[in-house]
Image (cartoon, grey):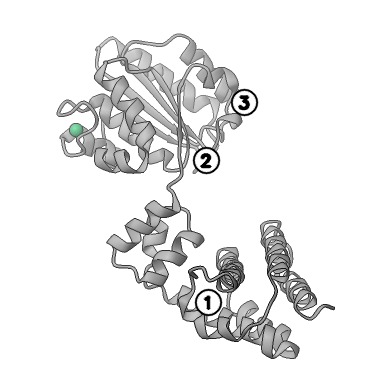
């Protein structure tokens, strides 16, 4: 990630870092939590070394070597790949202490630090309590509450804000997404890269077509909807990721129905002719959305998906036909 990207995607973080580096008040330890944390961690590491710019230029030898993970005096420990153990922290300390005399800068990143043993965290804490000149620690975590409070208090904490739907939409339009994609994808994915990757996705088009038919069945062919759900959804889409998209598109369709009733713009314009034929009351739409939210929760708890869909369809039919 380069400076201009950080400026637009994480304006608050950018401002803090720019301040810190401009005033040369660089902290010895950072904790970065939330979205895009690894990118920001590497950006800080580069900024510490980079001599072309106040923040990382992204192009000099130092910046490139960090991106590639081949810089001497730079250590990357990946807690998302393995549990960080005490021995790893101790050998880091040993090496950095030994070479600190040389006076060159040393930076280490521990990504997803919450995945460390208690002993490793305690050993790290001792390291942080006696900061060595020119040694910089950068930690990332999904949330600050999963890190030892005594470590958190010794770090400059940067919480990364998620991109808004509007900023994802802009990026999609810049990447030549269709109008429907630019409205739909931000509701399915909450990060820009994944949303952009799914422009022109055959998989999403397929799910959209299948859901169109399921909703058509639900209102006009209700006796077959359970069997069709099994054949066209359950047998075709297996992963939680796919099933979560299935449920979210169904949810969006009901939201659209509410919008149609109140003459507001819809997301799935390609469902327009279907929406026109459906008669449903606002309170029924709300109830259906509630049932879909319950199904999404079920999916998160790894419930049997066939059971979940049966319950979902019976629930929706109950609302629509007053049973
Ligand atoms: Zn640079």
Mark nearer the N terminus (3 vs 2): 2
Q: Report the disc number at residue 82.
A: 2
Quadrant in the picture for the C terminus:
bottom right
Q: Which mark is residue 301?
A: none
Question: Cβ–Cβ below 8 Å for labels 2 and 1?
Answer: no
- Distance between the alpha carbons at the discs numbered 2 and 1: 35 Å
The label nearer to you, 2 versus 1, is 1
The answer to which image quadrant residue 158 occupies is top left
Name the residue furthest front.
Answer: 263
Return the disc, 1 or 3, that comes first in the chain's sequence.
Answer: 3
Residue at 53% over, 76% down = 207
Callout 2: CB less than 8 Å from ligand 1: no
**Where 4 falls versus 16 (above or below)?**
below
Image coords of residue 258 (percent x, y): 61, 69
Q: Which residue is mark 3?
A: 118
Relative to 81, residue 210 above or below? below
Which residue: 26% across, 28% down? 47
Q: Which mark is residue 207?
A: 1
Q: Are marks 3 and 2 in contact (CB under 8 Å)?
A: no
Label 1 SS: helix
Q: Position of residue 281 (x, y in %)?
A: 70, 74
In percent of width and height, residue 9 lies at 35, 43
Q: Quadrant of residue 301?
A: bottom right
CA separation, marks 3 and 2? 14 Å
Give the quadrant of ligand 1. Answer: top left
């Amino acid at each position: 990630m380069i400076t201009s990207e950080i400026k637009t995607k994480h304006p608050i973080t950018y401002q803090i870092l720019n301040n810190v580096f401009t005033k040369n008040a660089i902290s010895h330890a950072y904790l970065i939590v939330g979205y895009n944390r690894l990118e920001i961690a590497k950006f800080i590491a580069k900024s510490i070394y980079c001599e072309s710019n106040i923040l990382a230029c992204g192009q000099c030898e130092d910046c490139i070597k960090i991106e590639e993970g081949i810089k001497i005096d730079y250590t990357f420990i990946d807690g998302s790949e393995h549990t960080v153990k005490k021995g790893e922290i101790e050998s880091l300390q040993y090496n950095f202490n030994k070479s600190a005399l040389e006076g060159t800068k040393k930076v280490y990143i521990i990504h997803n630090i919450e995945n460390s043993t208690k002993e490793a965290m305690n050993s790290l804490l001792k390291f942080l309590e006696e900061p060595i000149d020119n040694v910089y620690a950068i930690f990332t975590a999904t949330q600050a509450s999963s890190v030892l409070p005594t470590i958190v208090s010794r770090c400059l904490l940067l919480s990364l804000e998620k991109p808004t739907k509007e900023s994802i939409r802009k990026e999609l339009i810049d990447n030549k997404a269709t109008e429907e994609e630019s409205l739909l994808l931000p509701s399915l994915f909450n990060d820009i890269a994944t949303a952009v990757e799914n422009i022109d996705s055959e998989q999403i088009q397929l799910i959209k077509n299948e859901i169109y038919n399921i909703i058509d069945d639900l209102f006009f062919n209700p006796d077959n909807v359970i069997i069709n759900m099994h054949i066209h959804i359950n047998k075709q889409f297996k992963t939680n990721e796919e099933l979560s998209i299935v449920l979210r598109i169904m949810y969006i369709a009901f939201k659209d129905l509410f919008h149609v009733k109140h003459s507001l713009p819809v997301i799935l314009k390609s469902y327009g002719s279907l929406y026109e034929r459906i008669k449903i009351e606002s309170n029924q739409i709300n109830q259906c959305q509630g049932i879909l939210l319950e199904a999404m929760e079920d999916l998160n708890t790894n419930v049997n998906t066939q059971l979940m869909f049966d319950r979902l369809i019976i629930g929706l039919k109950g609302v629509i036909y007053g049973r």
